[in-house]
Amino acid sequence: MNSASPPVQQPAEIFVQAIQDCQGKSYPLFLRSQGDRHCLMIYDGAICVGQARYAWQGNGVLTLDDIAIANRVPTVPNAWQRLQQRLFKTEPPAVSYRQRGLGKALLASILDQGQRLGATVLLGEVFQPDVDNNPDLLAWYQRRGFQATPPTPGEDSEDLLAKISLPLSPPQTP
C-alpha cells in the first residue's frame, strides 16, 4: 500500500495589470491567492523585484503581512563585462528597485482589493529587522496615512516596533 500523499497544487499566478515606476518603466503585476491569503508580485523580466502579502480576515479587516522591494539585484553581465570582472576582480553592479514608486503601487493594489472586499481597515505590524533593512519604513507608512501605535508590553513580539492601521473608506454605491 502506497502511503504517499498527493502533491500539493501551487496556486497559479494571475496577471493583474501593468504598473509603471516613477521613471516610466512598465512592470507586470501578478497575483497569487490561496484561500484568503494573497501575494502580489512585480517582475522585471524573470526576476521578482517586489512583493506584497496580505490576507482577508473578514469583518472588514484586511491584514498586511509585508511589502518588500528588492534593494540590490545583481545585473547579468555580457561577455565583455564578465571578462573585465575577471581581470579586475570586480563585482557585477547591482540594481535597486527602491525609490521608484513600486511599493506605493503595491499598496494601491492592496487598497483597491480591500475596497472590493468591503474592508474598513488595513492592519499591519512593523518589526525591528524590517527597519534595520529599511530605516525609513515606519515613516513611509505614516506618509501614506497609516497610524502607528506602540506594541503592548508582554503581549507582542520583542522585535515588534509598531502596529500600523489605515482606515479605509467604504465602497461607493451608485
Image (spheres, helix red, strand yellow):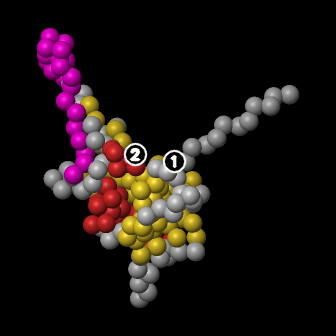
Q: Which residue is drawn at 52% across and 53% down?
A: 157
As displayed, is residue 156 above or below residue 12?
Answer: below
- Alpha carbon distance from label 1 to label 2: 30 Å
Q: Give the range drawn in magenta.
A: 78-99
Residue 102 appears anywhere in the view: no
As displayed, is residue 63 above or below residue 69?
Answer: below
Query: Closest to the observer: 52 or 132?
Result: 132
- Closest to the camera, between mark 1 and mark 2, is 2
Q: Residue at x 49, y 51 (%)?
A: 158
On residue 129, the disc is 2
The quadrant in which the N terminus is found is top right
Would residue 3 appear left or right of 146 to someone viewing this image? right
The x, y position of residue 101, in whole percent, is 24, 56
Nearest to N terminus: mark 1 or mark 2:
1
The x, y position of residue 20, in whole percent, is 24, 56
Task: Report the amino acid beneath label 1.
Answer: Ala
Question: SS of the residue at dot 1?
Answer: loop
As displayed, is residue 90 above or below residue 166?
Answer: above
Would residue 136 appear left or right of 151 to someone viewing this image? left
On residue 12, the disc is 1
Task: Report the amino acid beneath label 2.
Answer: Pro
Give the class, few, some or many, for how many residues have Cα within 10 Å of label 2's Cα (few <14, many ≥20): few
Q: In which quarter of the image is residue 73?
A: top left
Query: Closest to the observer: 40 or 156?
Result: 156
Q: Quadrant of residue 2?
A: top right
Residue 56 on the magenta segment: no
Q: In which quarter of the image is residue 155?
A: bottom right
Q: Which residue is drawn at 26% across and 31% down?
A: 74
The x, y position of residue 46, in whole percent, is 34, 37
The quadrant in which the C terminus is found is bottom left
Residue 140 appears anywhere in the view: yes
Give the number of marks. Answer: 2
